[in-house]
Image: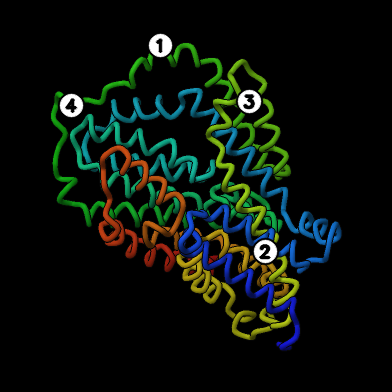
Amino acid sequence: MFIVNDWKLWLTLAWFVLTYTGLALGKLPWLRTDRTGVALVGATLVLLTGLLGFGDAGFAEAIKAVDFRTIALLLGMMIVVGCLREAGFFERLADWVGAHFQRPLSLLAVVFVLSGALSAILVNDVVCLALTPLVLHMTRRLRLDPRPHLIGLALASNIGSTATPTGNPQNVIIDNLSHISYLRFAERLAPIAILGLVAAFLLTAWIYRGALKAVANGDAAIEPMKDASRINAKKRPFLVKSLVVTLAAVVLFFLGAPMHLVALGAAAVLLLDRLKPAKVYRHIDWGLLLMFAGLFVVVHAFEVNVVERFGLAEWAPLREHPVGLLSVVSAVLSNIVSNVPAVLLFKPVVPALPLRVQESAWLALAMSSTLAGNLTVLGSVANLIVVEQARREGTTIPFWDYCRVGVPVTLLTLAIGIAWLLFVP
């Protein structure tokens, strides 16, 4: 119940609105503070105003609010992908694709398959960082319009990442909160990802059918990366090691081993090498990890001082129709404040639902918050990575040009996901 003189309630609401407004806008008005800074400022205000307790007691409560398993899993996976990049894995992959798939439509299909498959195993944001320059390289060498292939890369990255708990940051959070096994998670959501990839490819190919009619010239075969053969020969032992460790980690995930420990273990093994660790560290998104830590604190204060007063989990429609309702609400929120902050809002709600619907609710949240990222360029970090990297390389993807593919793909894949979770046991 709202009480006028309840200072904790009103201060929590103030800092929560400030933080989430900053996340929605991407920065604080009239300042250059980015989303990471916004989350850090919000968490600091929570601590300084005693919303979780004063002094060391409040700080200890904030430390408990941070899910270090999520931070550890993301850090470990970022190091693994960084090692794969330094070992030349993605360059070799691009050379092989360019040598075997030179027609526009077949290249688009391969981009969808590779982006979707890699994003199911590794964190999709990092996959987009690695693949965007390679897709640009291939399309330019083949004298193709890069836009459908770049948009396809972003779409497939989001859709493919739906399949597993390690596919994207919000799935990592949901897995740690729900304790659904890796195998069960993949069993329920991987079919949605596969169907979604097929649907997204067909829609993209149809919408860009004019651009994809052009056939690459016979003399425009893809050229290997500069000094690729010499560099690859030197890096071959590290490449083999990186691939073996990555495959071993995935096997352990499926066997039910603690994912955060597996990811850290894989990262530790790969860092025990002659490669300079600084080269790997530059591939880690430190800002994302810091943003997560800040958001955990802000959301915990919101949970303690606000959400517990509403009894939201007792709302009858939510208890009776969690899949449809959560999917729609999280899809909308994910396009307002981004998917990770949207998922954290449901952290105190889903565990209070009846046990019989909790698994479906968590899976619906993972599916919808991820697929909703394809709606616009701003819908996910993966989209922004592709668009911004392409822009720096001289290729512009206009906002509405992306939306004419992203909107129908999002609506269709969400419909597929909701139907699958509702009607397929």
In the picture shown, does residue 71 fall above or below 282? Answer: below
Pick whichever of labels 4 and 2 is earlier in the sequence: 4
Instruction: Give the residue at mark 2.
Output: 298
In the picture shown, does residue 221 fall above or below 55? Answer: above
Tell me where residue 298 appears, x and y as whole percent.
Answer: 67, 63
Between 143 and 203, which is closer to the camera in this rendering?
143
Give me the C-alpha separation between circle 3 and circle 2. Answer: 34 Å
Helix, strand or loop status at disc 2: helix
Between 253 and 342, which is closer to the camera in this rendering?
342
> Would you identify the image quadrant in which residue 389 lies?
top left
Residues at circles 1 and 2 in contact by the CB criterion of under 8 Å: no
Helix, strand or loop status at disc 1: helix
Colour pattern of the rendering: rainbow
Residue type, numbered disc 2: Val
Q: Residue furthest right?
A: 57
- The answer to whether residue 1 is seen in the rendering is no
Instruction: Give the residue at mark 1.
Output: 230
Residue type, numbered disc 1: Arg
Instruction: Give the residue at mark 4.
Output: 220
Give me the C-alpha separation between circle 1 and circle 4. Answer: 23 Å
Residue at the (72%, 42%) spot, across then down? 257
Badge 1 density bin: few <14, some 14–19, many ≥20, Cα 10 Å: few
Instruction: Give the residue at mark 3.
Output: 270
Between 280 and 219, which is closer to the camera in this rendering?
280
| Dot in front, 4 or 2 | 2
Helix, strand or loop status at disc 4: loop
Residues at circles 1 and 3 in contact by the CB criterion of under 8 Å: no
